[in-house]
Image (cartoon, rainbow, N blue to C red):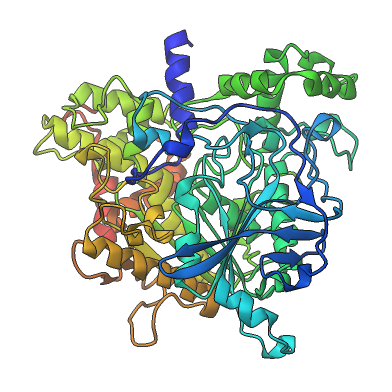
Amino acid sequence: MTSQNRIVFTKLLLCCFVAAAWARSWANHHDTTTSTTHTTPTTSQLPKNFHNDPLIVETKSGLVKGYAKTVMGSEVHIFTGIPFAKPPLGPLRFRKPVPIEPWHGILEATSMPNSCYQERYEYFPGFEGEEMWNPNTNISEDCLYLNIWVPQHLRVRHHQDKPLAERPNVPILVWIYGGGYMSGTATLDLYKADIMAASSDVIVASMQYRVGAFGFLYLNKFFSPGSEEAPGNMGLWDQQLAIRWIKDNAQAFGGDPELITLFGESAGGGSVSLHMLSPEMKGLFKRGILQSGTLNAPWSWMTGQRAQEIGKVLIDDCNCNSSLLAADPSLVMDCMRGVDAKTISVQQWNSYTGILGFPSAPTVDGIFLPKDPETMMKEGYFHNTEVLLGSNQDEGTYFLLYDFLDYFEKDGPSFLQREKFLEIIDTIFKEFSKIKREAIVFQYTDWEEITDGYLNQKMIADVVGDYFFVCPTNYFAEVLADAEVDVYYYYFTHRTSTSLWGEWMGVMHGDEMEYVFGHPLNMSLQYHTRERDLAAHIMQSFTRFALTGKPHKPDEKWPLYSRSSPHYYTYTADGPSGPAAPRGPRASACAFWNDFLLKLDELEHVPCDGAVTGPYSSVAGTTLPIVLLTTLATTAAL
């Protein structure tokens, strides 16, 4: 890989799972530093009347003191930087998290915590659409902290002398950020839940979890059973420990420990779906919200064998000699713990394999994930009875831009020549057979407009969005419904007026998040009235779902999603939001990915008399079997 390509790929992948920018001040984003120093929580002496201070909460780990903020005329109590695990430094690097020990005094929970170790991305210097995703706090391995937002009026009601049975049922929404399991932080301005807490009777929490090799290095087969060395899924264990802490302390903040809803976007959504299956998560939460991410997406998990191959490459790139793993794995791990975090953070990207081919992901470890997730999914291992999930209209454009920077411009459309279109297909699907690649080309070609480069650009973006996001979400929704889980599906189709990205990029991956967190309701930001209404509507849907298991009002129509009646609900500010035709988003395209390609895979293993050959640059060059079979699949989906 050339130096230039490595820079491109690194900047691309650290931008993973992102969305359109929203107008705001960046004053607090430009003074961050990188640190691996252990940050000890600040504590103060106990005042005599601390029980009367509404900003002090007595948790099972110790006393924490937050701060009050007035938002939209309501007071919110905010607690940031609460440790839930020991800092994973030194001997705790590459191990599961260890619960935090109780502290003495009052912990000052008033500053956002460190971001877990990762690389910043600056491919478009000074561009806020990119900068908004960079960590805005110190980058450190000492990062296992959580944040909580509580409406003040809930705290008042909680402190009233009422038996627990008579207190209101207050749901808790727990946010899990995305970032391809390689980047991300709960501290982003985008994820601040002030407005969500102020406008709803809910508590919102978020946590940091380790990403990249720090969170997912897996070398299990080189150690004896039960070893804590590089067990994989450390980032998921971080999430689990944070969720357990929130559940254990829910009542102290005025929340209901039996009404915890996990919600996450992209890799965060993938995490939620894995938590729905893991036996280690049973009883820790009630409902799940998955935004543009599910466990059956191509990027969402990897086999143990693949994870160990990547781990060995990283060990060698860090000069720790993977050939010693078989004879003395502990020696190798001692070496890896002596490598500085920056080296690990950079070298891990050498195993990037192409668009959304991340070098870290959840792994089948036999404990958190006893079997591969897709098998568990098909066997119906779900803990939960209600799920809200969805996808966006143009999921693929962001990733397409960053992985093929020579072909596309962020500010405007590009005329994509036919040969470039075919080249991108071959690059993305290099592991697919030729006949499958040919089928993809046929499915995503308008044969009457084959020379229209702008249409080619639109089609290749649809390929990426459908394959990596929309169609896996549709399939996951079907399997959930088959397992008698109540499934509500949304489809987000509004392009934000404040978007800094080119018009051609459409309704991008992650564009819904500013609405989920209610930022258009901040009157200092330049949103249209209809966008403010949409933000209020989406927030109400999410918080209502957390309380009741239904995202809609009693007088509002939002049918359940099922395989036979794949109803979904369109969120838009360009017209009325509401239920769409019962066919599921991108129904024809997803019939191709979820049904036809599986049948084609079966056909590939059937002996035939002649080889299937032929170029795919024109109708005449497309092989007849593909034309017929694809046409049949497309027709069947109509």
Foreground pick, 550 / 431: 550
Q: Residue at x 33, y 82 (%)?
A: 556
Q: Position of residue 217 (x, y in %)?
A: 71, 32
Q: Position of residue 592 (x, y in %)?
A: 34, 49
Q: Quick check: can you spot residue 55?
A: yes
Q: Quadrant of the C terminus?
A: bottom left
Residue 61 located left or right of residue 291: right
Whether residue 76 is situated above or below residue 432 in the rendered picture: below
Residue 46 located left or right of residue 344: right
Whether residue 527 is situated above or below residue 435 in the rendered picture: below
Q: Residue at x 35, y 25 (%)?
A: 124
Q: Quadrant of residue 203?
A: bottom right
Q: Residue at x 71, y 48 (%)?
A: 238
Q: Position of residue 127 (x, y in %)?
A: 34, 30
Q: Quick check: can you spot residue 388?
A: no
Foreground pick, 621 / 592: 592
